[in-house]
Image: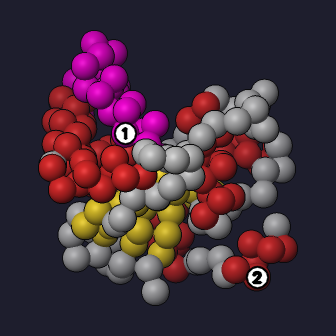
Amino acid sequence: MNRRFVIEAVMVAVYGQLLVPGRPVEYLIPFSTIQELYEMRDSDEPVMPEADEDEHVKQKIGELIAFFEESFNRKKIERALQMPWKKSPPLLVNDEVTFTVVYAIDNAHYGETFDPVETELILTALHEKAPIVTDHLEFLDKVIDGEVPVQTYDVEDFEYALEEQLTEEDWKSL
């Protein structure tokens, strides 16, 4: 059974180990986070604190953008953009990893506490009944403080997250 996680596109560029999970994984990626990759690539603002790390991550961001722009992948993504909450067919990354792009739509439900990307991550997790993987500790704190009914994992706990997967019954009890 594939493990499913909601994640921002940039997380895959920053944390290369996410692409070699050791078991089948499907990453559900809100489309707006793919758009953010272009902003990060073109910005003078560093993505990482160290210059050599920043250069490496920006290179990986460029490679990820190229992956999403490949003709076959771009066509799959464009299908998802036809209506809200539609998903692309799986984009095969390697033998164990697929990306599914979700045309998530921000709404005002969590807009008071969370920024638009955070809101889309939450709504995608709720809609798809999948946990969120992130490295934003403030976001994790806000989810806990706001008692948002989603499961979250810090990226450092990804190995544990692969082992721990909520069932449909678990989601109903949240």
Q: Amino acid at mark 2?
A: Glu
Question: What residue appears at the point 36 percent right and 78 percent down from the top-left corner?
Answer: 24
| Main SS category, magenta section | helix
Residue 18: in magenta span: no
Residue 106: image x %, image y %? 63, 36
Picture quadrant where residue 53 is located: top left
Judged from the image, the secondary structure of the residue bearing numbered disc 1 is helix
Asked if residue 137 can be seen in this view, the reply is: no
Q: Residues within 10 Å of mark 1 (few under 14, many from 20)?
A: some
Magenta region: which residues? 30-53
Judged from the image, the secondary structure of the residue bearing numbered disc 2 is helix
The quarter in which the C terminus is drawn is bottom right
Which badge, 1 or 2, is on the more N-terminal residue?
Answer: 1
Residue 61: image x %, image y %? 24, 38
In the image, residue 174 sits, relative to residue 136, either above or below, namely: below
Residue bearing the label numbered 1: 34
Residue lying furthest bottom: 1
Do the CB atoms of the residues marked 1 and 2 lie less than 8 Å apart?
no
Relative to 78, 4 lies left or right: right
Q: Amino acid at mark 1?
A: Ile
Residue bearing the label numbered 2: 169
Asked if residue 78 can be seen in this view, the reply is: yes
Q: Nearer the viewer, residue 48 or 167?
A: 167
Count the marks: 2
Relative to 50, 146 lies left or right: right
